[in-house]
Image (cartoon, grey):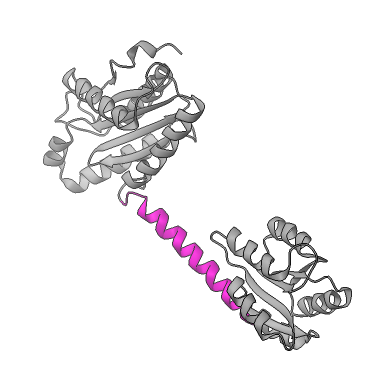
Amino acid sequence: MKVLVADDDFGSRLVAKAAVEQSGHECIVAADGSSAWELYKRHRPQVVVTDLMMPGLNGLELCRAIRSAEEDSYTYLVLVTSKDSREDVVAGMKAGADDYVAKPLDPFALHTRLLVAQRVTSLHTDLARYRAALAEQARTDPLTKLHNRLKLSEDLEQLHYRSSRYGTDYSLAICDVDNFKRYNDLYGHQAGDLALQSVAASLAGEGRESDGIYRFGGEEFLFLLPGQTVSGAETRLTRALEAVRDLGIAHSGNPSGTLTLSAGLSAFVPDHRVSSERLLKEADMALYTAKSAGRNRVEVAPEVRQHTRS
């Protein structure tokens, strides 16, 4: 573990540093609370051993600052107090400390606290990893492994906010597998699932790293294209539709004889700074137009067609 020792007394720092290193841990030292806070932000140690009374931030203030700054990690805080300061111990616990040791510092006492700290911080690390995995799972479509509608809702809200604040553009498109019900009827739902997985992999393999691709529902997919003009987005979608056609997935119920996509596109561009809900509706209507016009094509919403210049 990485352990930060904060104490304004030189002798106490030496004793604590030796005890930490003899326990097999890396030690960082600070001679006052303000330096300790800066070192904490830079190194993010798993354990902080802090004296109660120090120049700059005192031990209680340092504990509160660390607790306020924590996110997914957990820092084990040990407060160093005088032997008869019960009120200080209680105040330290209320400020966020996990344990305390009395002065003069006993290396064995500190060693036992570090053993407990290692167990506690290890547990918190595991919990943080499990929480992150669950959060990712909740935002991932189990069939296609693309992001799902929950993640789309979060990403679209953030993208729309940034674009509105800074005056940047983004495009949004809804894609749909052509005649997919007929595909399922002809080849079965298992084949339909495999086809959706292939389409998703093809779409994910195209374009920029910043582009967002989501399973919107059923056989529908949605693209979020940050910083993309209407004409640039149309080109991007045209390539995506070509990539799906190039998969050569047989579909005798489709006029082309292979699986194809249709797409409807709208955009957040100058003179069309509308809500994200409006953009979704426009893209959906453009998709309907693409279907009506024969499928296997990209249709741009009429509200943004005038912005097709790059």
Is residue 286 or residue 56 the one in the foreground?
A: 56
The residue depicted at 20 percent of the width and 30 percent of the height is 178
Q: Is residue 163 left or right of residue 9?
A: left
The residue depicted at 48 percent of the width and 33 percent of the height is 162
Q: Is residue 263 left or right of residue 44?
A: left
Magenta span covers which residues?
115-142
Q: Is residue 35 magenta?
A: no
Q: Which residue extends farthest right?
A: 10
Is residue 96 shown to the viewer in this render? no
Asked which quadrant contains residue 48, the reply is bottom right
Residue 310 x/y as whole percent:
46, 13
Residue 104 x/y as whole percent:
81, 85
Give the quadrant of the N terminus: bottom right
Is residue 284 or residue 39 the one in the foreground?
A: 39
Residue 117 x/y as whole percent:
63, 77
Residue 171 x/y as whole percent:
39, 26
Total marks placed: 0
Q: Is residue 131 magenta?
A: yes
Is residue 73 shown to the viewer in this render? yes
The residue depicted at 36 percent of the width and 48 percent of the height is 145
Q: Is residue 249 left or right of residue 9?
A: left
The residue depicted at 71 percent of the width and 85 percent of the height is 85
Is residue 9 or residue 263 the one in the foreground?
A: 9
Position of residue 76 relative to residue 102, above or below, is: above
Q: Is residue 175 left or right of residue 308?
A: left
Asked which quadrant contains residue 81, the reply is bottom right
Position of residue 163 relative to residue 125, above or below, is: above
Position of residue 191 relative to residue 7, above or below, is: above
Asked which quadrant contains residue 118, the reply is bottom right
Main secondary structure of the magenta stretch = helix
Is residue 116 or residue 271 the one in the foreground?
A: 271
